[in-house]
Image (tube, helix red, strand yellow):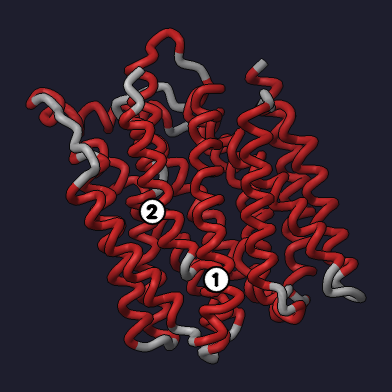
Amino acid sequence: MERKNVYIYYFSQILLFVAASLFNPVSYMFYMDNGLSASIIGISISILWISSGIFEIPCGIFTDRHGTKNTMILSTGLSILGLGLLIIKTNTPLLLLSSFIFGVSSAANSGCLSSWIVNYLKSELNETFEQSIIQKVFSTSNIYTSIISIIFSFLVLQIIYKINPKYPIYLSFIAYTICLLFFFLIFPKRKRTQKEKKNKLRNTFKSYTKVISKEFILLSIYFTIPSVMDMGPVNQWSIVFRDTNLLGVIQVLIVGSFVLGNWMVSKTKIQQKDILKLVIFDVLLIIFLSVTDKFNKYIPIFFFLAHVVINTITLAVNMSYFHSNVITDDKNRNTLFSTFSFLNSLIVGLLLVFQGFLSDVLGMSNSWALFSAIGCILYYTLHNKIMKKSN
C-alpha cells in the first residue's frame, strides 16, 4: 500500500490540531476575562454546534462534489475570519457572530479528512480492509497530534496567556493561515470523471433517502451521548480547576490521557459491545469528581483525567464502528457522515444552552454529574436495543 496519503493525513491533522490547541484551551477563560458570563458563553457554544449541524449536510455534499482539498481550504479560511473578528473586539455580538462562523468551519472540516483517508484505504486494500485498520490509523494520528501539540498547549496555559491574554488568539490565527497555505499548495486534489460529476447529486440524493430512517436516528442519538456527557468537562475544565494554578500541567496531563486512550485503542481490540461498561464507569468518575470538588481542589483532577481516557476510547471506537459498519457507501461517505454530524450537533447545541444555565445555577461540576447520569441511562437503553438488533 502506498503510504504517502496516510502521511499527508497525519500531517494535516497535526497542523489543524496545533492551530486549535493554541486558543481552544484558554478560550473559555478568555471570554470570561472579557466580561462574558457562563450563560452567554454557553449560548455562543450552542450557536457553534447548531450552525455546524445546519451546514453539515451541505458541506458533506460540497465535499463529495468538489473534493476534500477545496473543503479544507474553505474550513481554514472561515476559522481565520472568525478569529480575526475576536481579535478586533471580544464582545457579545462579535462572539456570537464568530461562533456561527466557527460552526460553518467545523461543519466543513467535520469528518472530511477521516472520510478521505477511509476511502483511500478501502480502495487500496479492497478485501483486506477491516475496522481494526481504521482504528489503528485514527489512533496513531491522535497520538502524533497529541504529542506535538502538548508543548503548545502547555506554553499557552502556563506562560503565554499570563503574559498577554491576546497572544494565544494571535498565534492561532497565524497557525490557521499556515494550514490554509498547506491545503492550497500541497494537499492532493482528487481527480474525478465527468460522469461522476454529472451523477453526483442524483447518487447523493438516493443514498441520503436510503440512509435516513428511524434506525439511523437512533444510532445517531446513541453515538452522540458520549459527546453530551463530555460537553461540560471539555468546555469548562479550565474554569473548574483555575484555582489550582496548574492549568498548564493539567493540559499536559489531558493530552497524555488522550494519548493513553488512543494507545489502548490501537493496541487492543475493544469492540462496540464493550463500550457500555466504559460509559457506566465514566459516569461514576464524573459523580466522584463532583463530590470531591466540594472539599478539595486537587483530587477531582484525577477523576477528570480518568474521564478523558475513557471518553477518548469511547469516541474512537464509536467512530471506527460508524465508518466501517454503518456507512457502506464510499462515494457519498462525506454526505452520510455529515447527516449524522448534523443530528449530533443539533442535539449537543440545544443541550449546551441548558447546560450553561445549570452551570450558573447549580455549579459547573454539578451540571457535569447531572448530564452524565442522564446520558448513561439513555445510553444503556439504546445500547441494549441496538446491540440486540445487530446480533
Residue 12 drawn at (x, y percent): 36, 46
Query: Which residue carries the number 2 mark?
Result: 15
Q: Please name which of the two marks, 1 or 2, marks the residue nearer to the observer.
A: 1
Residue occupying the point 49% across, 31% down: 137
56 or 163, nearer to the observer = 163
Q: How many marks?
A: 2
Where the N terminus falls, by quadrant? Answer: top left
Task: Answer whether residue 40 is visible to the viewer in this image.
Answer: no
**Residue placed furthest toward the right:** 295
Residue occupying the point 38% across, 11% down: 126
Inspect the image, locate mark 2, and give the three-letter code of the amino acid beneath it: Leu
Q: Splitting the image into 4 quarters, where does residue 364 fall?
A: bottom right
Inspect the image, locate mark 1, and give the three-letter code of the amino acid beneath it: Leu
Residue occupying the point 74% across, 63% down: 368
Dot 1, crowdedness within 10 Å: few (<14), some or many (≥20)?
A: some
Q: In this rendering, is residue 155 above or below 260?
A: below
Task: Give the structural element (helix, strand or loop) at label 1.
Answer: helix
Q: How far apart are marks 1 and 2 (CA)?
A: 17 Å
Q: Which mark is residue 155?
A: 1
Residue 234 drawn at (x, y percent): 62, 61
**Residue placed furthest toward the top:** 127
Residue 139 drawn at (x, y percent): 55, 36
Task: Give the structural element (helix, strand or loop) at label 2.
Answer: helix
Residue 264 drawn at (x, y percent): 68, 34
226 or 11, nearer to the observer = 11
Q: Splitting the image into 4 quarters, where does residue 180 fall?
A: bottom left
Where the C terminus falls, by quadrant? Answer: top right
239 or 348, nearer to the observer = 239
Dot 2, crowdedness within 10 Å: few (<14), some or many (≥20)?
A: many
Give the mark nearer the N terminus: 1 vs 2.
2
